[in-house]
Amino acid sequence: MVLGVTVGVSIIRNVMEIIQCCVLFLIMDKPRYAWKKTISIYAVFIGLCTVVSTIWVLKHPQSYGKLITVSFFAIAFVFFICMSKCSIAQVLYNISLLVFVLLWGIGMGVRGAMLFFNGNIWADILIRFFYFLLVVWLYCKYYRKAYLEIAEYLESRWKWMAAVALAGDILFIYCSIYPQHVMVRGLRDRIISCGIAVILFATHIIMLRAIYAMRNELKVKEEMEYSRLNNAYLERSLVMIEEKVEQADRARHDARHHDLVIMEYARRGALEELLHYMEEKAETEEMETPVRFCENKTVNSILSAYVQKAKQAGIKMTVDAAVSQDIGIKDIDFTAILGNALENAVHGCIKAGEAEPFIDVKIQMKNNKLAITVSNACHGEVVFENGIPQSEKSGIGVKSMMRSADKYDGQLDFQCVDHVFKVRIVLKTP
């Protein structure tokens, strides 16, 4: 054996590899459960693997040395799939990458101990330990954030990513152990093996950086589209304000004529005609008076704009809103969330082509949470992917809603039942 490994050292190494594998996987993963529960389950998993591997190495050390790595990663693969919200392909990629990283650590530990410490076993273990700490630091500081960002963008692309990573691991392992372990081969073979490892590592970095650049480019396009939508809403709001100003100017201009008519009726003593005229005037003013849905001016403005838009499209829109002025949600985020929800509702009603299209809006505050529910008639053929409705267009409106909602730990739920589309949004208010 390389470095003359004993049973006790095998157990220590095995425990280290199990812990390293779980920690590196968790850094790149999106756990299915809360972190407290996840860590507890992982601790139990590590304990069970340690107990089983210890019994195995004591009973059959030869089979342990040959099969422990393959056995552990087969079990870990099933365990990680059960504990992760990620796809199977992404889990396979994560495992393939961490296997590659850990194999580097094993090679550095063994080779470093042989070259600088006369094959001291504890030097090998210490080199692996400090290598692991360095990898964790690099992962957390430079890798994790970017990786999690591109993970959502990749989605269906994980299959070929996992295939490349797995093929690279198989090639690296094969070249390292066949026809014999690379550590006991000549300098030329060790250089070739090291070159393969460097190329595989560079392949990972190049793929991830290319995907990250693509993701950034997509985010720029989304920002531009997001700004375009906000500008469109602001333009509609400006048109409404100009209309209100014109109405106010007309009201001031007409007020003098109304006064003259009233004076004439009063001078002639025509009380019935005067009362009839005043009733008509009151009805007209009531129709022209803007509706106040809630105290929040931004929400009221958005609702007023879409009530008018729905009316022009022949859509019946009902509103039940109770939102105070100062709830800690920025106007631009209200625009992105509520404005896009109502915009989608209007388009849904128009596309449905029903005889009596409708939109129902409910906005309520409860326990420091703002709940928004928008229901509308739809054609009943909405396509969902991972719970998100897919649009024939870019779907930028839904993405804009989700991004703004994330600022307030928001939750969005989309449903389509019996030709009624419903979006429910819950935001935590500061």
Image (cartoon, helix red, strand yellow):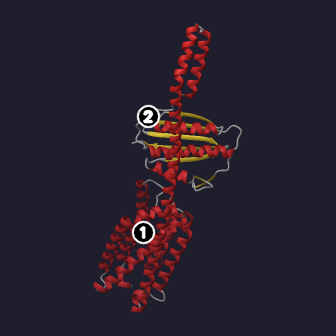
Mark 1, residues whose alpha carbon is within 10 Å: few (<14), some, or many (≥20)?
A: many
Amino acid under label 2?
Ser
Q: How many marks?
A: 2
Looking at the image, which residue sits at the far top?
269
Depth check: give the residue in front, 235 or 70. Answer: 235
Please state the horizontal and vertical placement of residue 333, each as a whole percent of the image.
46, 46
Q: Locate the C terminus and report the quarter of the image it occupies.
A: top left
Relative height, residue 289 to residue 422 (above, below): above
Residue at left offset 44%, top offset 85%: 193
Quarter of the image where one finds residue 107:
bottom left
Q: Locate the N terminus and report the quarter of the image it occupies.
A: bottom left
Q: Secondary structure at mark 2?
A: loop
In the image, which is nearer the foreground, mark 1 or mark 2?
Answer: 2
Depth check: give the residue in front, 183 or 331. Answer: 331
Q: Secondary structure at mark 1?
A: helix
Relative to 124, is 392 on the left or the right?
right
Residue at left offset 64%, top offset 40%: 313
Quarter of the image where one finds residue 309:
top right
Depth check: give the residue in front, 105 or 310. Answer: 310
Amino acid under label 1?
Cys
- What label does residue 324 carry, if any? 2
Q: Is residue 162 visible?
A: yes
- What label does residue 21 carry, if any? 1
Please state the horizontal and vertical placement of residue 100, each as a whole percent of the image.
44, 75
Residue at left offset 45%, top offset 40%: 369
Distance, label 1 to label 2, CA atoms, is 50 Å
Please state the horizontal and vertical placement of residue 11, each as a whole percent of the image.
38, 73
Q: Is residue 150 visible?
A: no
Relative to 44, is 118 on the left or the right?
left
Marked residue nearer the N-terminal end (1 or 2)? 1
Mark 2, residues whose alpha carbon is within 10 Å: few (<14), some, or many (≥20)?
A: some
Please state the horizontal and vertical placement of residue 155, each as a whole percent of the image.
54, 63
